[in-house]
């Protein structure tokens, strides 16, 4: 009996140590309020994006939920209005897997909204498929869609400066790779659609997020727009919905025990969107509400410039 008690106490102690030293995230302590400011959050009908939108709505922002599924987005907007007491929560349809939809979103937004203070490129996925324009789904949505969206909205951000672009990347960018010849022949950064290819495609797309932010900062130097990317932590969300059922079941106990909830996962995004004084770190990468170093490829300015130029050609922008 006492051995069992010792084992349970030991296991609990170990859990607390691992949870607090590895998984538990920091909180954004900024007290900035957002009355009169407009924020776009892509992919804000669920997960980290929805939690981010709610916390920004609580600070008084006018929130644009940029989501692909109008019904899910309206349900999220309803929850956010109710929980925040802020009625300035608007849904606008945006499918990042379609350049046409990105253009149409930007056109509607620019016509109807006079301000843009913070753009949060949060939407993301890990899974198979192709975009409407024939690109690998993960590369197309996680990188190209956000690349085009940001560029279409940049002038408005500049008019409303000081303003910010925040892109949710991931620690997995460290395993990313960019093969431009594969991209030219396959319209993708991976050569197949297996589970392994999907995982590699995700890492590659997150490296693109890091390089995009770096090059954007270079191009915005001297303007009133700054940009940041981040790792949100490991969060229990719907991100792995395309992973097989048995893999999800296998992961669930571990996820329940260790992963952060979406509110915890939104803290570094909030930090990058709100924290005063981080402007000198435009283009850099944050994790746990603090500046962090990126992997070697994420610091490669020539690679960042090339990715930007190729992305311009692929999206026909400008
Ligand atoms: N969860 C983690 O541990 C973790 C770790 C590192 C980085 N991240 C990053 O955090 C971000 C948010 O992910 P999450 O964990 O909150 O995942 P999630 O719960 O699956 O939410 C992803 C959001 O992206 C949207 N989305 C997907 N494809 C889209 C498209 N074509 N157009 C517009 N929106 C689209 C989804 O919309 P639907 O609901 O309509 O599909 C959903 O709103 C992603 O960029 C992800 O890579 C997450």
Image (cartoon, rainbow, N blue to C red):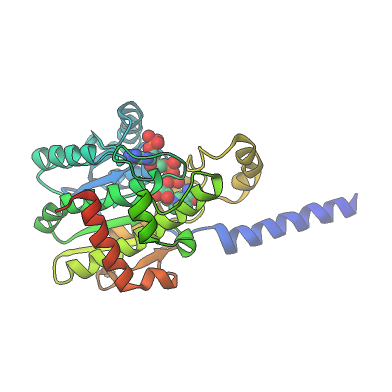
Residue 209: quarter of image: bottom left
| Vertical order, 205 against 53 (above or below) | below
Q: Is residue 20 left or right of residue 28?
A: right
Towards the viewer: 124 or 128? 128
Residue 26 spot, x, y in % from top left: 46, 60
Quarter for ligand 1? top left
Q: Is residue 275 left or right of residue 198?
A: left
Is residue 53 something that shows in the picture? Answer: yes
Q: How many marks?
A: 0
Residue 11: quarter of image: bottom right
Q: Could you tell me which residue is drawn at 49 percent across and 42 percent down?
A: 237
Q: Could you tell me which residue is drawn at 89 percent across and 53 percent down?
A: 2
Q: Could you tell me which residue is drawn at 26 percent across and 59 percent down?
A: 310
Which residue lies most toward the front here? 185
Residue 147 spot, x, y in % from top left: 26, 53
Residue 231 spot, x, y in % from top left: 43, 59
Residue 311: quarter of image: bottom left
Q: Could you tell me which residue is drawn at 18 percent across and 71 percent down?
A: 221
Which residue lies most toward the top here? 71
Q: Is residue 203 left or right of residue 7?
A: left
Is residue 293 something that shows in the picture? Answer: no
Residue 71 spot, x, y in % from top left: 33, 26
Towards the viewer: 173 or 88? 173
């Amino acid at each position: 009996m006492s051995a069992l008690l010792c084992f349970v106490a030991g296991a609990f102690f170990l859990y607390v140590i691992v949870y607090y030293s590895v998984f538990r995230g920091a909180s954004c302590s900024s007290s900035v309020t957002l009355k009169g400011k407009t924020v776009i959050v892509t992919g804000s009908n669920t997960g980290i994006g929805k939690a981010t939108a709610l916390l920004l709505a609580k600070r008084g922002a006018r929130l644009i939920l940029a989501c692909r599924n109008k019904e899910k987005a309206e349900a999220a907007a309803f929850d956010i209005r109710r929980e925040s007491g802020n009625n300035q929560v608007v849904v606008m349809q945006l499918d990042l897997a379609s350049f046409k939809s990105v253009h149409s979103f930007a056109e509607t937004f620019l016509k109807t909204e006079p301000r843009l203070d913070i753009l949060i490129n949060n939407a993301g996925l890990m899974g198979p498929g192709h975009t409407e324009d024939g690109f690998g789904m993960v590369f197309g949505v996680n990188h190209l869609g956000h690349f085009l969206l940001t560029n279409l909205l940049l002038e408005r951000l500049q008019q409303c400066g000081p303003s910010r672009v925040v892109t949710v990347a991931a620690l997995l960018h460290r395993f990313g790779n960019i093969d431009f010849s594969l991209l030219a022949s396959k319209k993708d950064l991976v050569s197949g659609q297996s589970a392994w290819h999907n995982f590699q495609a995700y890492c590659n797309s997150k490296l693109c997020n890091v390089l995009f932010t770096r090059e954007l900062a270079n191009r915005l130097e001297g303007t009133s727009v700054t940009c940041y990317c981040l790792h949100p932590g490991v969060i229990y969300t719907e991100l792995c919905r395309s992973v097989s059922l048995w893999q999800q079941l296998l992961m669930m106990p571990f996820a329940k025990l260790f992963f952060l909830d979406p509110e915890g996962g939104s803290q570094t995004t909030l930090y990058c969107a709100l924290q005063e004084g981080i402007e000198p770190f435009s283009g850099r990468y944050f994790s746990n509400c603090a500046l962090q170093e990126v992997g070697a490829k994420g610091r490669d300015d020539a690679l960042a410039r090339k990715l930007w130029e190729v992305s311009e050609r692929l999206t026909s922008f400008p």
